[in-house]
Amino acid sequence: MARRPGARRIGEFVFFNVLYEDGTQTSNRKVPCSVIEGIDGDLPAKPYIEEQDRKIAKMSGKPRGPIKSVTRASRG
C-alpha cells in the first residue's frame, strides 16, 4: 500500500498530532504501522491513542480530556 504524501513515518511507527476538546494538543504521538495498515486507514489511530492516554492517566493520576481530532504529523 502506498504511503500518503507528507506523512511522517519512521521505522515501524506513524506519528500523529492530537487535538483535545479542551484546546490542548500533543504532537508526534507514535502509533504502530500494524494498527493503521488495514482498510480503515487512519481511523484506528484514535482508539489506540485513547488507550495510551488511559494508561498514562492511570500511572500519573492526571486524566486527559476527550480527543477532538487526530491528524498525521507532516514532515518537517
Image (cartoon, rainbow, N blue to C red):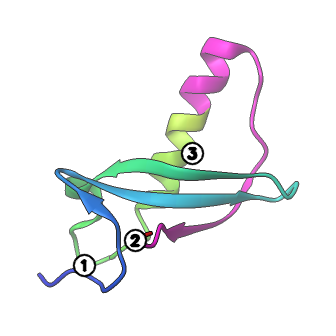
Give the number of the disc on residue 65. Answer: none
Residue at the image point whose x is 36% and y is 81% from the top: 6
Q: Amino acid at mark 3?
A: Glu
Distance (Cα) linking label 1 and label 2: 23 Å
* Magenta-colored span: 54-74
Q: List the single residue furthest toward the front.
A: 76
54 relative to 4, above or below: above
Dot 3: what SS? helix
Task: Identify the residue under disc 3.
Answer: 50
Distance (Cα) linking label 2 and label 3: 23 Å
Pointer 2 with pointer 3, Cβ within 8 A: no
Task: Identify the residue under disc 1.
Answer: 39
Badge 1: how crowded within 10 Å, few (<14), some, or many (20+)?
A: few
Residue 39, x across and y down, in percent = 24, 78
Residue at the image point whose x is 60% and y is 36% from the top: 53
Q: Is 17 positioned to the left or the right of 32 in the image?
A: right
Dot 2: what SS? loop
Residue 24, x across and y down, in percent = 80, 52
- Any magenta on residue 72? yes
Residue at the image point whose x is 75% and y is 37% from the top: 64
Q: Is 22 positioned to the left or the right of 71 in the image?
A: right
- Any magenta on residue 51? no
Give the number of the disc on residue 75. Answer: 2
